[in-house]
Image (cartoon, grey):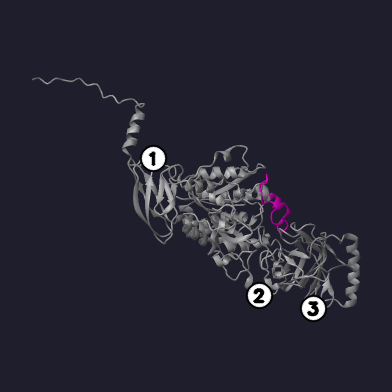
Amino acid sequence: MGSYFAPWFFHTLLATLLTILNETLDCSMITLKSFAILRVLHPSARYLTIFDFSEKLPNNYCPPMGLETLKIDDFQLHASTMRRYGLGAHRGRLNIQAGLYEDDFYDGGWCAGRNDPLQWFEVDARRLTKFTGVITQGRSSLWSSDWVTSYRVLFSNDSHTWVMLRNGSKELIFPGNKEKEIPVLNLFTQPVVARYIRVNPRSWYNSGSICMRVEVLGCPMPDPNNYYRRRNEVTTTDNLDFKHHSYKEMRQLMKVVNEFCPNITRIYNIGKSYNGQKLYAVEISDNPGEHELGEPEFRYMAGSHGNEVLGRELLLLLMQFMCQEYLSGNPRIRHLVDETRIHLLPSVNPDGYDKAFEVGSELGGWSLGRWSQDGLDIHHNFPDLNTILWEAEARKWVPRKIFNHHVPIPEWYQSKNATVAVETRALIAWMEKIPFVLGGNLQGGELVVTFPYDRSRLVGVTRQVTPTPDDHVFRWLAFSYASTHRLMTDASRRVCHTEDFAKEDGTINGASWHTAPGSMNDFSYLHTNCFELSMYVGCDKFPHESELPEEWENNRESLLVFMEQVHRGIKGVVRDFQGRGIANAIISVEGISHDIRTAADGDYWRLLNPGEYRVTVRAEGYNPSSKVCEVGYEIGATHCNFVISRTNMSRIKEIMEKFGKQPINMPNRRLQMRPI
């Protein structure tokens, strides 16, 4: 089967097969066949040879080669012409986004220098590859409308001699896009093996130009001598369920994890989505269901944007991994589970996910499923507490009328008529109920970690560095994730879209990227004790499931390291002289104008970088108390406990309340006269 047929036999066989194909297929639109014909361009041949394989074609189609995920390098992409550098072949990647200000470096696709049928976009696979289809989009642009409406596909082994994909004697013309954002998939009726593939636009939007974003479906053919391929392969040894899970499958996977590790896991839900789907979470702890005194609470959540699917699958993989490693006796995982109460909420927006999942990987575009069922961006649907605090600071109301922490939610936001997603309300109730210390929400479409504030102080400014009082802590937390990710801090990696975050160590202040009022991160910091960050875990929001093992390897260490940061800083219990924990006591650190509060049992956790800190505790009815606490460089929070005494006034009030605020009557005693 490795040799090619003689020309006379080839033409006879081809005529017979084309007769069958013409009778069974409408080749103007691509349909799946019940049998497989592999069309191969032989390295030394100038004509096509055909081989028959027994597998059926639905299983014979290949995953994306990786234009969107950047597995295909810029130097593998070529084009006939380009309008300018920012619209060169290197920008012709599926779902690539243009910046707000389209410029000569980062524009939203490949655009030909001329509008004529001689233009082409080419991918060099660098080895023989079985090509099975092409996905196309138009140009990403706020200002232009450009897309290709039809195209041809050609193949080559040497980039000089090209063979066109045909339907018998007629060239195959594939239908392209009808607008610029929705991807269109065309599967080849027959897989083709070659090294190079070209897309040749034949028609385009009549008010626009030849512009495309492309993904190619292809499987590399076995070649043990191909060093380039082996050098770039990433494999995993973890035995996990690497696939995209429907809502039902996600729930079933959680049950399996719970059945394997019943002593350290618990499944619960925090509420329901707009469509009534429960928002399930998995707790991982040595005593699930209980808050243990002195044990910090940590959370990961994902899927607030339903189409950003990678984070959802990473959390499902993480819960499997932690269960397996705990059972196998991994000391790192055992220590993490025994000393931390971990909560994993993989799908905040299951309704949006269902929309993206229905069309599948690569075909949802940039936004299908992003919003909740009622059209709200859950991640930016929280009350804007920044403005409330900053206005209070400007009027010098802090701390007299408003505290610098636990900023209350305004009444209008809590009304039934407020534009608030039911998922957001469920999240807020969850965040208020559990004394979380640290959290991360996994998002997609970039490779960066962002930290508060997400809103700039100046109104109308779209980008402005806006640090919190805990900026140094947030920067460390962000760097702890980014620096242990396989790609985020790699200075040689290609940018996902328009921003080179690697030169910033893979982290950025949210407001300096793009300002966004009402973010989950800002709300968490200003309304609760929890420090929340956003991890953008991959350029591709919805990678093909064949990419999941590599994405797991990219993020696994980062996910663990970030969880371990919950044990950095100081922790302790605030008690009275009777040994009772004091709830809602205020913990202040000198020099940091952001306080936290104790939980219901009087325990607290304050994230801090290494150093010496003067810590003061205050509680209503108690005398304040201060001490110096030292934070070391090793992981493990420093114990800093307080015992505080009641104020005289609080004691008087307590006695008066005990007696109904009436004058205290002394017991009647007979005065006995002493004899003279």
Which of the two residues, 344 or 435, is positioned nearer the viewer here? Answer: 435
Image: magenta residue range:
354-375
Residue identifier under label 1: 620
> Can residue 262 be seen in the rendering of this structure?
no
Is 359 magenta? The answer is yes
Query: In this rendering, which labeled residue sits more in front, label 1 or label 2?
Result: 1
Q: Is residue 187 magenta?
A: no
Tell me which amino acid carries mark 1. Glu
C-beta proximity under 8 Å, tags 3 and 1: no
- In terms of depth relative to the viewer, which is nearer, 241 or 630? 630
Q: Residue 388 in the image: x percent, y percent?
A: 52, 45
For residue 450, what is the image quadrant?
Answer: bottom right
Assign the magenta stretch its main secondary structure.
loop
Quadrant for residue 611, please give it: bottom left
Residue 42: give x, y in percent of width and height. 80, 76
Q: Secondary structure at mark 1?
A: loop
- Judging by the rendered image, the residue that carries numbered circle 2 is 228
Q: Earlier in the sequence, mark 3 or mark 2?
A: 3
Looking at this view, name the residue that lies furthest to the bottom. 44
Residue 124 percent coordinates (x, y): 73, 73
Q: CA distance from mark 1 to mark 2?
A: 67 Å
Q: Residues within 10 Å of mark 2 (few under 14, many from 20)?
A: few
Instruction: Give the structural element (helix, strand or loop) at label 2.
Output: helix
Q: Would you name the residue on which mark 3 appears?
A: 160
Q: Amino acid at mark 3?
A: His
Cα–Cα gap, marks 3 and 1: 82 Å
The single residue placed furthest to the left in the displayed view is: 676
